[in-house]
Image (tube, grey):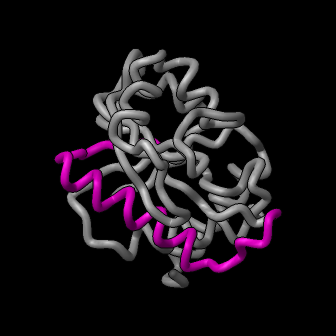
Amino acid sequence: MEITLSTDDITTVAVDAIVNAAHHALRGGGGVDGAIHRAGGPAILADCIERYPHGIPTGQAGWTTAGNLPAQYVIHVVGPNYTAGQRDPALLESGYRNALRIADELSVRRIALPAVSAGIYGWPAQEAADIAVRTLLGTTTGVAEAIFCLVEPRLYKAFGKALEKAERGGR
């Protein structure tokens, strides 16, 4: 899998699937979640309600239509809320692995991702980046290209360091 970094708004990137850093209720919210729901329109929320009436647990993922977004699907990942005490790295790894599992089920080849849990959920940027890159590179998948959309300079820098570490063999 090729991993690239971008400063583009995730809602504008033309890919097969966009990953959403979602709240467990899957009803929209702030940050990336809110931006995806606003740009994608009401079809995403309607699909969330129909498919996941009770939401999904932390570390899990589900998918919906992408509505008006330049993608076919949105893969909703519920990352751990570091600020609320959910600090087990396995939960963050699980979210990324489940996103790739769903991507494979949907035959996704190109995917755009945010820094799951590293925004309003407060996960330390470098640790979140290391976990994300290590998990994507260490998971067998049919996804050929993963584009991390990182509009915050601190996240772009952290993911750049994580990729450098991976290239040196320090996955």
Image point (64%, 43%), residue name: 150
Q: In this rendered view, identify the residue nearer to me: 17 or 44.
A: 44
Q: In this rendered view, identify the residue nearer to me: 112 or 157.
A: 112
Q: Answer above or below: position of 84 versus 27.
A: below
* The residue positioned farthest toward the front in the image shown: 54
Please state if 144 lies on the left or on the right of 31 as rendered: left
Please state if 45 lies on the left or on the right of 122 as rendered: left
Q: Answer above or below: position of 17 versus 141.
A: above
Quadrant that contains the N terminus: bottom left
How far from the left and from the top, in percent, is residue 155? 72, 52
Where is residue 89, by image quadrant?
Answer: bottom right
Please state if 103 lies on the left or on the right of 88 as rendered: left
How far from the left and from the top, in percent, is residue 91? 56, 73
Q: Answer above or below: position of 88 versus 110.
A: below
Q: In this rendered view, identify the residue nearer to me: 158 or 97.
A: 97
How far from the left and from the top, in percent, is residue 82? 76, 66
Q: Which residues are magenta?
A: 83-112
Image point (43%, 55%), residue name: 3
